[in-house]
Image (cartoon, grey):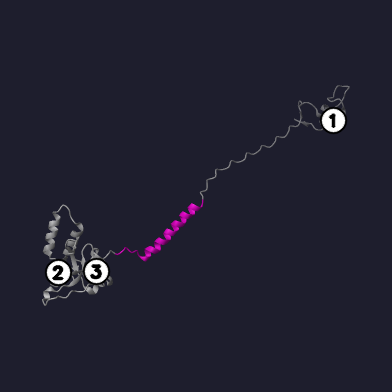
Amino acid sequence: MSFPPTTIVLAKVKGYPPWPAMVLDETLLPAHILSKQPKSKTPTSANPNTVKKVVPVRFFSDDTYIWINTNDMKELSKEDISKYISSSAQKRRKDNLLEQAYELANDPPDMQQFILYGSKGVPPEPETTSEDDEVLSIPAKKKQKQQQQKQAASPKKKKESPKPKPKATPKPKPKPEPVVEYDDDWGLDEFNKYDKALGNFIYDTEEEQTKVFSKVTYRV
């Protein structure tokens, strides 16, 4: 029985349960997988049905490559896949990896994408920002960073409290000059006379009295 590329098969490997896989085109394989291709064994008898041939397959879900003998696999039909999924849903303990492999076999990916990206398929493209957004966003970030650095470098200035105004020193009051009080009916000429005989004198000598009266301010 021949298994052309893209055929969905159930391959059996010793030590593992039968596993869904896809037969691949040898010309599309990576170099390190192609280099591991074993030689096909030729039959010892003339019966062509005894020919053993190995083909490359890749298992679904765990993405392992293997060169497998065609006698160790069989074609996996849609009916077989539906039966397994229905029976697996009723089990308490599930092999999630194997169940995912059957789901992929039920809706297999493109062979070339399966070889390149595996069971997960083509990875999503990262979000790209337009050039205008980059031009606008970069200066804003730089400006914000510069402001933060400036604030961190310069210490905050404390508000200086207003200094009290110096009190004006009062000017010294002038010393009052001696004032000789007199009645307004006194005559100035008679007031500043020196006559010891008549008792009209204040100081003992006329010279002393004249000296004092020359400095006296009369208050009228």
Please tell me whether mark 3 or mark 1 is closer to you in this view.
3
Crowd tier of the residue under label 3, counting other residues whose Cα lies within 10 Å: few below 14, some 14–19, many 20 or above: some
Of all residues shown, which one is farthest toward the front? Answer: 44
Picture residue at 14% right of the left edge, 59% below the top:
85
Picture residue at 81% right of the left edge, 29% below the top:
188
- Read off the magenta span: 125-154
Mark 2 touches mark 3? (CB < 8 Å): no
Q: Is residue 31 above or below residue 82?
A: below
Residue type marked 3: Ile
For the C terminus, the image quarter is top right
Residue at which label 1 appears: 210
Residue type marked 1: Thr
Quadrant position of residue 90: bottom left
Residue at which label 3 appears: 115
| C-alpha gap between disc 2 and disc 3 | 23 Å
- Residue 177 vs residue 37, the one in the foreground: 37
Of all residues shown, which one is farthest toward the right? Answer: 197
Secondary structure type for disc 1? helix
Please tell me whether mark 2 or mark 3 is closer to you in this view.
2
Residue 125 at x, y percent in the picture? 29, 64
Crowd tier of the residue under label 2, counting other residues whose Cα lies within 10 Å: few below 14, some 14–19, many 20 or above: some
Q: Is residue 151 above or below residue 218?
A: below
Residue 87 at x, y percent in the picture? 12, 57
Residue at which label 2 appears: 71
Residue type marked 2: Asn
> Image check: 18 left or right of 201?
left
Of all residues shown, which one is farthest toward the bottom? Answer: 46
Crowd tier of the residue under label 1, counting other residues whose Cα lies within 10 Å: few below 14, some 14–19, many 20 or above: some
Residue 199 at x, y percent in the picture? 86, 22
